[in-house]
Amino acid sequence: MILFLYGEDTYRSRQKLKQIEERFKQTDKSRINLFIFDGEKTPFKNIEKEIVSAPFLHDKKLIVIENFLKKKGGAKAQEDLIIFLKKNKVPESAVIIFWEEGIPDMRSAVFKLLNKPKQAEKFEPLPEAKLCQWISKEVSERKIEIEKQATELLATLVGPDLWQIAGELDKLVAFTVKRESKQNIITAEDVKIFVKGRFDEDIFSLTDAIGNRNKKQIFKLLNEQISAGLKEAYIFSMLARQFRILFQIKETVEKKYSFVSPGDYSLKQNLASDLGLHPFVVQKTLAQIKNYKLEELKNIYKKLLSIDMKMKRTSLSPRLLLDLFLAEICVG
């Protein structure tokens, strides 16, 4: 049996791997039949040896191979794996899990061989609605409650980085259970106090700079985010999300609320309700829509969708695609 776990959402793929390992440990208390290999460093012949050998005093053995497709200069190892798998040498007693961090080269023969229905599972970043559901479920499992607004705000501030969200929830839960009022519910105010979003103010600053065609500021902000450890693909996903929101708000304002003053409090509340967005996001975005025409936002979003396809289907680097997009926007 072979399983292939991969994708940008390494938190959920790790959780899935951990669940499988824990279930196996319950059947094999000695753990002597559990093998975890660093696929980048371990020669395939060493892995093959464990695959074909019989389990010790057990009917199964679990073999986890991490980041095998990332092996540098690993053409020979990948070729050996392909030959091994095509000859059906995997015994029934072996359960093999290939775990990959991120998206491997989808053009490789090994990826195509492993990426089969019922065998492969891709973990993509959760969209906003599912992200909120995930947060609510995590909080519930910690025997505590969270306000709907707090859930939405946490998802907005942090984005789809589940590693950070899990860490923020640890802090919020610890504070809530020790609260003097004994109110075991995480509030939106708690989130505002304790959570520093990775891309909260910066994404708005970046879209402001783009709207003003301030090339120097655009690349300054971009470089600061990359230096802070954010990956280009993540920055791109947040940019795409913000431009989608800009388009939705601009379109809705022009169709339904063109007669309402931008500073009217009811406008923010109505837009939040109409579009299912947090009022915080609506308020920040309303200040930006004056920098863009509706058709311009539509074209920018189309370009972002096109770049997203290139990121997934070509070998062009995310940084190059991001730089080209921003440079093109500046030229206008």
Image (cartoon, grey):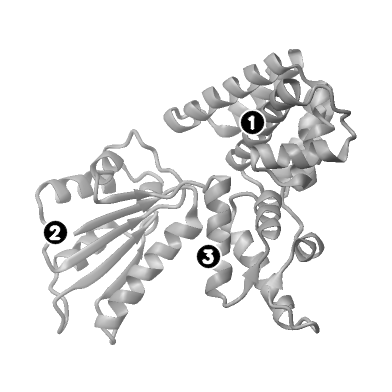
Residue denoted by label 3 = 137
Q: Is residue 214 visible?
A: no
Q: Position of residue 67 (x, y in %)?
A: 39, 54
Characterize the local packing of mark 1: few (<14), some (14-19) or many (20 or more) Cα atoms within 10 angstroms.
Answer: some
Q: Which residue is mark 1?
A: 244
Where disc 1 sits, the SS reads helix
Q: Earlier in the sequence, mark 1 or mark 3?
A: 3
On the image, numbered disc 2 is attached to which residue?
Answer: 90
Of mark 1 and mark 2, the one earlier in the sequence is 2
In the image, residue 77 lies at what x, y percent?
A: 27, 49
Along the line of sight, the residue nearer the viewer: 138 or 237? 138
Q: Is residue 295 visible?
A: yes
Q: Position of residue 88 (x, y in %)?
A: 10, 52
Type of the residue with mark 1: Arg
Instruction: Name the quadrant of the N terminus.
Output: bottom left
* Above or below for 325 versus 241: above
Disc 3 crowd rating (10 Å Cα; few below 14, some 14-19, many 20+) is few
- Tell me the quarter of the image containing the C terminus: top right
